Amino acid sequence: MREPMEFLLLVWDELDDWTGACRHVAGEIFSEIGAVEAPLGTALIAGTATAWALLSHFRHFGGA
């Protein structure tokens, strides 16, 4: 049977490996979300600005 300290070190090493893997996966997920979200956010802001400009143009020049 293994000594308690050796067992504790093995468990600690496994936990460290799993937390490192989870940290890596979480970082990859967030970077992928950021890569997709940035262009979508830009498109949304540009669309909103365009709609606002068109509405104010129609209001000023007699649309409604």
Image: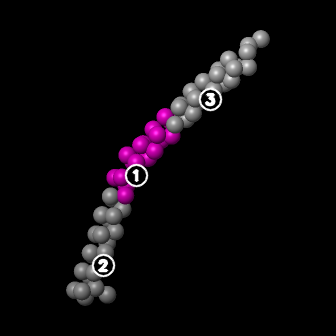
- C-alpha gap between disc 3 and disc 2: 58 Å
The residue at 30%/64% (across/down) is 46
Relative image position of residue 26 (x, y in whole percent): 51, 40
For residue 47, what is the image quadrant? bottom left
Q: Are marks 2 and 1 in contact (CB under 8 Å)?
A: no
Q: Which residues are magenta?
A: 24-41
Is 43 placed left or right of 11 in the picture? left
Residue occupying image coordinates x 24% and y 86%: 60
From the image, state whether disc 3 or disc 2 is nearer to you: 3
Query: Is 12 on the left or on the right of 60, as rendered?
Result: right
In x, y percent, where is residue 43?
Answer: 33, 59
Q: Above or below — where is 23 with respect to 12?
A: below
Using the image, determine if residue 26 lies above or below residue 57.
Answer: above
The residue depicted at 62 percent of the width and 29 percent of the height is 15
Whichever of callouts 3 and 2 sits on the residue coming sooner in the sequence is: 3
Badge 3 amino acid = Leu
Secondary structure of the residue carrying numbered label 2: helix
**Amino acid type shown at disc 2:** Leu
Q: Position of residue 33 (x, y in %)?
A: 44, 47
In 3D space, how far apart are the residues under numbered discs 1 and 3 (Cα atoms)? Answer: 32 Å
Q: Answer above or below: position of 30 versus 55.
A: above
Q: Which mark is residue 37?
A: 1
Q: Which residue is mark 2?
A: 55
Quarter of image, res 59: bottom left
The numbered mark, 1 or 3, whose residue comes first in the sequence reads: 3
Residue 18 located left or right of residue 1: left
Between 21 and 5, the one lying in front of the other is 5
Q: Secondary structure at mark 3?
A: helix
First along the sequence among labels 2 and 1: 1
**Residue 38 magenta-highlighted:** yes
Q: Please identify, in this view, whether the residue under mark 1 or under mark 3 is nearer the observer.
A: 3
Q: Which residue is mark 3?
A: 15
